[in-house]
Amino acid sequence: MDDQSLREALLPSNEENDDESTVPSKPGLCLLRPFKQQDEIAVKKIINDATMEPMGEYFMKALFSEIFLQMAFLSIAVGFIGFSIPLTLCVTLIPVAVAVVYIAIYAAHAIKVMELHGDLSNISQVYQQDQDTGFWVAEVYDFMEGSELSAHFNITKKVMYDFVTQEELDRREINLAEYKHRSVVGCIALTHSLNSDNVRKAWLRRMAVKMEYRRRNIGSNLLELAIDFARRHQYKGIELLTTECHYQAREMYHKSGFTATMNTRYFFNVPQPTYLFTMSLKSSEESKKLE
C-alpha cells in the first residue's frame, strides 16, 4: 500500500477517535455556593478581566468619534504651525493621537479595576455580614484536566453542566472526588439598593463569568439564584446597571424579566450608553396566592 492510500485508510478512524475523545461521557457539575475566602484571587481575576474586556470596543468607537478627528488635526496644526515641521512629517503625528486615545481609555478602565478592589478585598465584610445580602460563586467540576478542557472548549463548544446549590450537594451526597478539574468561573453579588424611592430593593452587582465558560447557562443560573434570594428576603424589586458593550448580559437580563432604561454619559466626548435594569418581585407567599 502506498503512502497516499495509507493516509486515506487511517484518516476516518482518526477523526472518529478524536470526536469520541473530546466529548465527555456525562456533563460536569456546577456548584452555586456562597463565597469563601479562598475564592478571593479567582473572583478578582474574573471581575478584573470582565472590566477590561470592553476596552477594545470603547477604543474603536473613540477612533471614529469627533474628538479623535479634533486631536488628529490639532496634532498636525501644532507641529506644522508651532514647530514649523513639514506637513508630510506632521501627518505622522496621527499615530500619536491614536496612542493618546488608547492610553486614556486604558487608564480609565485600569482605574475602575483598582476601585473594584475596595469591596473585592473585603467580600465577607461587605456582602456576608448582613443576612439580607450575599456573594456567590459558580464552581465547575469537570471530568477532564484543565488543559484538556481548554482544548475541548476550542473544538466542540458542547460542555454543559448539571447545576446544584450547596444545600442540594449536601443532600444528594455527591462525590466530588471523581472529578479531575475544578475552578471558580463566575460570581454574583446582591446588596441593598441606594435609590431612595421608599421601596425596599436589592442592587445586583459583580456579575461576571469567565469568557470561555459563557453560553453554558452559568450566568443565568447565578442570576436566578440571586433573584430567588431577593424574593425570599422580602425585597420588592432588583436593580442593576450595565453598559452598551455587555451584549450577552443585557440579553440575559431581558430574558429573565428585567426591563431597561437607557441613559447616555460621555467620556472624552464619546457617548457611553448605560442601562438601568429593574425587576419587580413578589414574595413567595404572594406568588402562591396568585397561583
Image (cartoon, grey):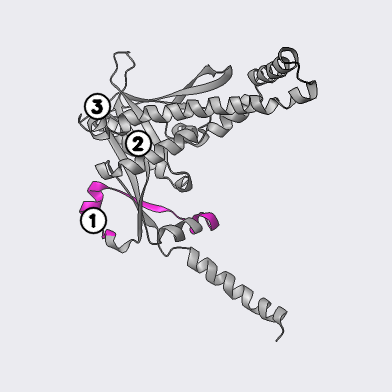
Q: Quadrant of residue 59?
A: top right
* Tag nearer the camera, 3 or 2: 2
Which residue is at a point 64% across and 27% down the rendered structure image? 98
Picture quarter with the N terminus? bottom right
| The one of 142 and 118 positioned closer to us in this rendering | 118
Q: Residue 130, position in %: x, y? A: 20, 29
Picture quarter with the C terminus? top left
**What kind of residue is marked 1?**
Arg
First-in-chain label (3 vs 2) = 2
Q: Is residue 59 magenta?
A: no
**What kind of residue is marked 3?**
Gln
**What kind of residue is marked 2?**
Ile
Which residue is at a point 42% across and 36% down the rendered structure image? 48
SS at badge 2: strand
Image side of residue 154 versus residue 240, left or right: right
Residues in magenta, as a range: 152-176
Residue to which mark 1 is pinned: 172
| The one of 286 and 76 positioned closer to us in this rendering | 76
Q: Is residue 172 magenta?
A: yes
Q: Residue 64, position in %: x, y? A: 66, 25
| The one of 48 and 200 positioned closer to us in this rendering | 48
SS at badge 3: loop
State how far apart marks 3 and 2 are (Cα). 19 Å
Residue 284 appears in the figure: no
Residue to which mark 3 is pinned: 234
Residue to which mark 2 is pinned: 188
Mark 2 and mark 1 in contact (Cβ < 8 Å)?
A: no
